[in-house]
Image (cartoon, rainbow, N blue to C red):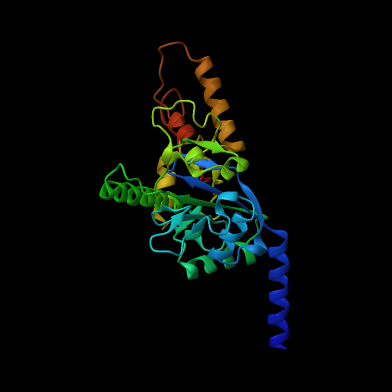
Amino acid sequence: MTTMMNSAGKKRKHADACEKTVLARVVFENTTAIEPVVISALDVGSVKSLLVAIGNVAPFLGIGDVDLSLEPPVLRGQTLFPSVFLLQENPTGKHALQHTRWVTMHWNESLDFSRWYARNVEDGTEDELKVELHLHVEKDDKSWCDQVEALESLETDLRLAGTGETTLENRQYRHIQLEDLENPLQEWHPAFEDEDDETAGESQVAGTNEWFPMRQITNPSQGCQLCHRIAQERPKIAPRGKKAAKRQKAMARREAKEPEGSSKDDSGAGTGAGAETAVAGWTQTFVMR
């Protein structure tokens, strides 16, 4: 009986994966993004299969073009720094994950990728998930140490923003069409562009922060520091409801009847206790931006 139930569960998860898609794009040098490609979620059960699936659509990731398993990895003969994957999170079970918009990992973290796949593809409810791959070419004209320091800082920013601990700055990426990737690397890759060339990459698309969807907190927790921070950052909203509306209308009528400059000592009039009651009971919303 148990074997039959496990088999039925696997078939259900397989069927769910067949109906879901992954929208993947590659970002070069944190400045340029390729046109997103649509992949069946069934074809991305591992990091390697994800790369193969992207390569079947994006010419630059074809067989022989890129190898992230090498040390160091290469892209058409150009040395790459370690790649960074951003994988959209959307489970609503664990409260901590509700703050997470994406998880950040490297290509060789296969166990973390498998866990992400189980949470979001097999057990998730979203029909489409977004994946972003960040690649950086090692530049000969810049200090290697400076490049490493900058990339480590960028990865930290991406990781913290993904978990909701910080917020990325909204920015635009240059946009590259898929057919342009068939040209030599030097013709389209931003690492080979003149920094003063204002004509390169005229078309722009949303950066990482805007491309990944925002999360909505379904069950705010009083003991959660992130929930507390969000509550402090959100603007205060006046109380609503029938009772609050009646109090506000009564205050307006009293203020309209009073001569200008007059005041009353009894509670509930003028700027006394009644005014305080009308603005007491501020509420907070926990809907993520």
**Measured along the vertical axis of the image, is residue 233 above or below residue 251?**
below
x%, y% of residue 160?
39, 51
* Residue beneath the point at 45% across and 39% down: 190
Left/right placement of residue 51 relative to residue 18 reads left
Residue 222 place in picture, x, y as percent: 44, 55
Residue drawn at (61%, 63%) of the image: 44
Left or right of residue 164, residue 2 in this image: right
For this view, does 91 lie left or right of residue 200? right
Quarter assignment of residue 54 = bottom right
Residue 184 x, y percent position in the rendering: 52, 43
Q: Nearer the viewer, residue 225 or 210?
A: 210
Indicate the quadrant where residue 232 lies: top left
Rendered view: 138 above or below 237: below
Up/down of 63 relative to 166, above or below:
below
Q: Can you see residue 248?
A: yes
Between residue 29 and residue 266, name the one nearer to us: 29
Q: Is residue 154 left or right of residue 110?
A: left
Q: Is residue 284 visible?
A: no
